[in-house]
Image: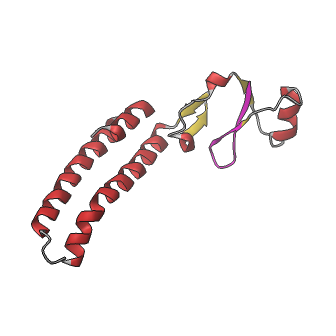
């Protein structure tokens, strides 16, 4: 059993009791005064923490704010795209002698196309799992 509550930043805080106190005593001690909380089974909290910053309190468990999940997905997409761009950016930016700038630009175009497809899939997603699948697609 765990204790969950909506924290002041809009996310969900999870308290994992150690067993030294009963769960109600832990809630009284650790949940901020005046904040409502739920005591839930472990499976009411997602085991996948990919979209942890998009968790919100549901009626009985932790839910995901899909718009926040999409933002997290887009942030991950941009970071991955930037990593793939780096070696090609170096060639174009530094005008390295003997390096093929046309090939570098062609590679960048392919990367852009790849990540445009990922962006479209994220925008169309209706669940965190669909966003995660879009990010994992090659």
Residue lying at 71% horizontally and 36% vertically, measured from the top left: 5
Task: State the image quarter where residue 97 is shown.
Answer: bottom left
Q: Residue furthest front?
A: 98
Residue 20 image offset from top left, x and y in percent: 88, 31
Q: Quadrant of the C terminus?
A: top left
Residue lying at 62% horizontally and 43% vertically, measured from the top left: 11
Residue 28 image offset from top left, x and y in percent: 87, 35
Q: Is residue 43 above or below residue 77?
A: above
Residue 95 image offset from top left, x and y in percent: 18, 77
Residue lying at 51% horizontally and 37% vertically, measured from the top left: 65
Judged left or right of residue 111, residue 50 is right
Task: State the image quarter where residue 43 is shown.
Answer: top right
Q: Which residues are magenta?
A: 1-14
Judged left or right of residue 19, residue 136 is left
Residue 51 image offset from top left, x and y in percent: 51, 40
Looking at the image, how many numbered discs can be counted on the residues? 0
Q: Give whichever of 137, 6 is nearer the camera.
A: 137
């Amino acid at each position: 059993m765990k204790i969950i509550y909506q924290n002041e930043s809009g996310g969900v805080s999870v308290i994992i009791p150690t067993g030294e106190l009963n769960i109600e005593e832990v809630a009284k001690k650790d949940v901020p005064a005046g904040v409502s909380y739920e005591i839930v089974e472990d499976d009411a909290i997602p085991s996948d923490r990919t979209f942890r910053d998009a968790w919100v309190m549901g009626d009985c468990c932790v839910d995901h704010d899909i718009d926040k999940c999409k933002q997290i997905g887009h942030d991950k997409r941009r970071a991955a795209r930037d990593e793939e761009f780096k070696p090609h950016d170096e060639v174009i930016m530094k005008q390295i002698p003997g390096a093929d700038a046309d090939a570098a630009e062609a590679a960048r175009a392919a990367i852009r196309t790849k990540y445009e497809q990922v962006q479209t899939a994220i925008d169309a997603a209706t669940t965190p799992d669909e966003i995660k699948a879009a990010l994992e697609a090659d």
